[in-house]
Amino acid sequence: MSLATPPNNSIQAVVFDFGGVLITSITNQLSKLAERHATDVPTMLTIMLGPHESGDHPWHRAERGEIAVADIQNSLKPWASQHDIELHGDEIDALMSPGQYTVIGPMVDKVSELKNHGLKTGLLTNTFAEFRPKMQQDLRFEDFTAVIESFAVGSRKPEPGIYQATADMLGVAHHEILYLDDFPQNIHMAQSFGWSTIHVTDPIAAISEIDRFLGD
């Protein structure tokens, strides 16, 4: 985890990624799939979730709301073939099956604390329309000033459009945002907009980083 800029008091909004920040990452399940297919986790991640660069991978398309989650699996074959891997047909179900992640309670409570202290709070996530009911079960949506979902805005991290939509929906300037995410490519795009960032590798430790950044 790294703090991108020194502590300051200009922050008006703290924005949280979902996977890897508020919940444990679903990519943890990729290790089981990688073992099953006798490959490594980075290769399995590229096949299932697509490359770091946003593009026409079916997972990316679903996150932008262009296709349904149910259509992802049947569209993965060309990506698997590039790595000489034959999928079994149930990989998406295995990746998204219940019980593959846990909610990080202290971080969820931190959102509520920040909101109660007068800061705006945002949830910025690459996700699917089909997954929204589950997120509403896991989180207290009322603790967020704005919920920015990739499928709803037609843009996914690290595409620029979703970052602009976040600032607009929160009603703050870009330099007034502190953002937490676990993927470097998402952090880098946020920084290009002038956001302050915390790259999360340990969510519990990141809570202390928030306090240090805000000068609490």
Image (tube, rainbow, N blue to C red):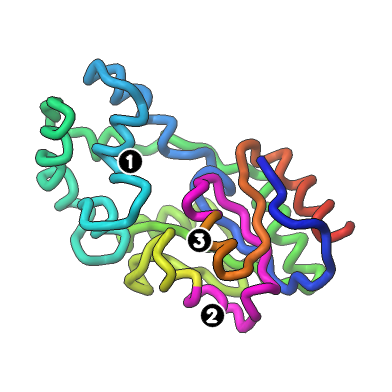
Cα–Cα span, label 2 and label 1? 29 Å
User: Sequence order check: which comes first, mark 1 or mark 3?
Assistant: 1
Whether label 2 touches label 3, CB < 8 Å: no
Cα–Cα span, label 1 and label 3? 27 Å
Please provide percent x and percent y for residue 106: 70, 45
Kind of residue sitting beneath label 2: Met
Kind of residue sitting beneath label 3: Met
Which residue has dot 1 on it? 96
SS category of the residue bearing label 3:
helix
Q: Quadrant of residue 204?
A: top right
Question: Of the numbered discs in the image, which one, if any, rests on residue 169?
Answer: 2
User: Sequence order check: which comes first, mark 2 or mark 1?
Assistant: 1
Which residue has dot 3 on it? 189
- Point out the frontmost of discs 1 and 3: 3
Cα–Cα span, label 2 and label 3? 18 Å
Q: Is residue 106 visible?
A: no
User: On the rendered structure, is 204 left or right of 20?
Assistant: right
Q: Which residues are magenta?
A: 164-187
SS category of the residue bearing label 2:
helix
User: On the rendered structure, is 139 left or right of 128?
Assistant: right
Identified at 49% across, 55% down, the residue is 186
- Closer to the camera, 104 or 2? 2
SS category of the residue bearing label 1:
helix
Q: Is residue 65 visible?
A: yes
Quarter of the picture containing the N terminus is top right
Crowd band around label 2 with a 10 angstrom C-alpha radius: few (<14), some (14–19), many (20+): some
